[in-house]
Image: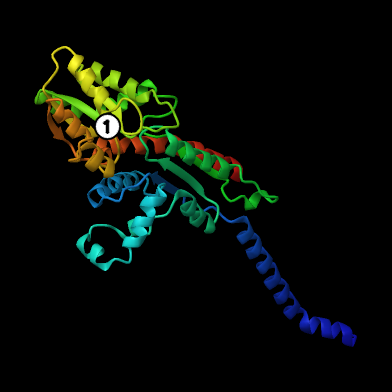
Amino acid sequence: MSKKVCFFLLFLPLFLLVFQLALATVSNEAKAFEREPQKPAIVLAAFGTTEVSAVGSILNIRDKVVAAFPEYDVHLAFTSNIIRNIWHERKSDAAFKKANPRIPQEIYDIKNALSVLAEIQETGARAVLVQSLHVTDGEEYTDLAKLVEALSKYDTLKPVLKPFPWIGVGEPALGLKDGQKPYLDRAVQALAPLAEQAKASGAALVLMGHGNEHLTQKVFAKLQTALREAYGPQVYIGTVEAAPGAEDIVTALKASADAPSKALVAPMMIVAGDHALNDMAGEEDDSWASVFKAAGLEVETHLVGLGSNDSWADIYVEHLKVLAPKVLAQQQKDQN
């Protein structure tokens, strides 16, 4: 046997070991490159609030979602830059944190939806459900939906590196297209306790929505009609940023048959935050409570956000249950 053959046979086991290690390395690198799917995620995007007493409404929705989707990572995001900055400043305020021990750290660290999504993507491809915690498809929801749409279309030369291959956005509480009957019916059911409370005390129920200057929304008018059909004529919905306002509601209420002398005023928002505490129930002359009192009405204010209403919080859970199969079906299709 030649020396070359002997040398080869002597070192053959070593060559095989090196070859196996090289294959394992290539396999691991390929596996990492493919980014095996991670645990799916949910991002709950709310406008946010700076009011300590109102944070619980958002956390209640979060808790409902966590209970309904135990297999998902659930994250919160605030769409308001101003509100996030205030919480970030409070994070280093020891006195504030000591006085408010029930505020969780995630509120002090709160990010916008894009930042939360970036952190989720950093750990690998996964199904992501972005659920709007807005009431209507107004400005805030529209911007959120456009963000998700843009991310879903973000393409790469290598399809495997697409950052958001499976992502979708859940509808706001009252749905899209100025309200459709199933959404309105669900909202009417959720608002039953307020309507019954007003009726029991002989008061008109006045709901204050946010509204916006940029998009005309007929959904509040449709919801008002649906509420009146269910609970009687003395139900009114107005908005802070658009019509009808407090004065418009007073005029309509005074002109109605058997006009009540009382009004139960409540926020048509997921939190009883700054708008509810000041624009609705504040002591200033232009607050809704003051306008109604000046018109001779006895006023009771309900300073609890819709998010604290379990039936309303469940609306967002139901929207997620509609969205999840759509996103997961696309993931399943891509992986097969």
Which of the two residues, 142 or 184, is positioned nearer the viewer here?
142
Look at 27% across and 44% down and name the residue there: 274
Q: Where the N terminus falls, by quadrant?
A: bottom right
As drawn, the residue found furthest toward the front would be 285
Q: Image check: 99 left or right of 10?
A: left
Q: Residue flagged by tag 1: what amino acid is it? A: Met
Which of the two residues, 148 or 121, is positioned nearer the viewer here?
148
Residue 204 image-quadrant placement: top left
As drawn, the residue found furthest toward the bottom would be 3
Look at 17% across and 34% down and name the residue there: 290
Q: Which colour scheme is used?
A: rainbow
Residue 93 in the image: state x and y as whole percent. Answer: 29, 66
Residue 236 image-quadrant placement: top left
Look at 44% across and 51% down and name the residue there: 112
Q: Where the C terminus falls, by quadrant?
A: top right
Q: What element carries label 1?
A: strand
Which residue was labeled with disc 1? 208
Total of numbered circles in the picture? 1
* Residue 336 seen in render: no
Q: Image check: 48 left or right of 195?
A: right
* Residue 292 seen in render: yes
Q: Is residue 138 above or below residue 200?
A: below
Residue 206 in the image: state x and y as whole percent. Answer: 22, 27
